[in-house]
Image (cartoon, grey):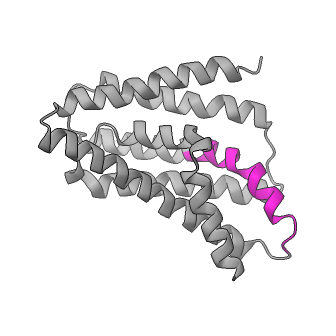
Amino acid sequence: MSIFYLYFQLGISHITDIQGYDHILFLLTLCAVYSIKQWKNVLVLVTAFTIGHCTTLVLATSNLINISSTVIEFLIPVTILLTAIVNIVQKNDYVTHKLHTIKYATALFFGLIHGLGFSNYLKSLLGMESNIIKPLFAFNIGIELGQIIIVLIIFSITGLLTNFLKFNKREWSMVLSGIGLGVSIILIIERFPF
């Protein structure tokens, strides 16, 4: 098995692992207000998130930044909470171009935080590698594909409920955002570092 494939598989399994549900919950909350018709916007959001965490993965695995994992584990649910709040206060069930631009910037920034959450795991794996560029690239490609898989599952469930079972899209968005809001508050309380 090649190094690239090994780290690619690790990236996919790391993001889709249910034990890392906080990252999945972030994607769920991020996608909650989008419809399948806006799939290009969601792809941009997911890619912005990947660019953010790829950046901090490179910096952290190169030992250029080092932030306490306790602080990062606290900040990850904060990103979910803020995303859920924006979804809830959004006035309509369609994301405008201006709001999408704001969401793109926040997804990029929140990706920086989530990337630091991945960095300790990846650092331990890369410790045995002489060259980290190829494994790091493969891991991030795997993360991106894993995120796309999660988004496709979210859109499939949303499409089934709103198109076939006639759930109201705005109400379904509020359900998903409410889940993100509630679970993130619990995680914030559990992980409060001070």
Please give the name of the residue rendered at 61% of the width and 34% of the height, measured from the top-left corner.
76
Does the magenta-highlighted stretch encompass residue 123? yes
Q: Which residues are magenta?
A: 111-129
Q: Residue 91: which quarter of the image?
A: top left
Q: Residue 79: which quarter of the image?
A: top right
Image coordinates for residue 64, horizontal then vertical, percent: 81, 54
Image coordinates for residue 38, horizontal then vertical, percent: 24, 51
Image coordinates for residue 187, horizontal then vertical, percent: 61, 24
- In what quadrant of the picture does the C terminus appear? top right
Image coordinates for residue 3, horizontal then vertical, percent: 71, 78
Please give the name of the residue rendered at 37% of the width and 28% of the height, measured from the top-left corner.
177
- In what quadrant of the picture does the N terminus appear? bottom right
Q: Residue 30: which quarter of the image?
A: top left
Does residue 83 appear to the left or right of 57 in the view shown?
Answer: left
Does residue 20 appear to the left or right of 177 in the view shown?
Answer: right
Examine the rendering and report whether any part of residue 62 can be seen.
no
Tally of marks: 0
Name the outermost residue toward the front: 165
Does residue 6 appear to the left or right of 70 in the view shown?
Answer: left
Is 71 rendered above or below residue 117? above
Does residue 73 appear to the left or right of 159 in the view shown?
Answer: right
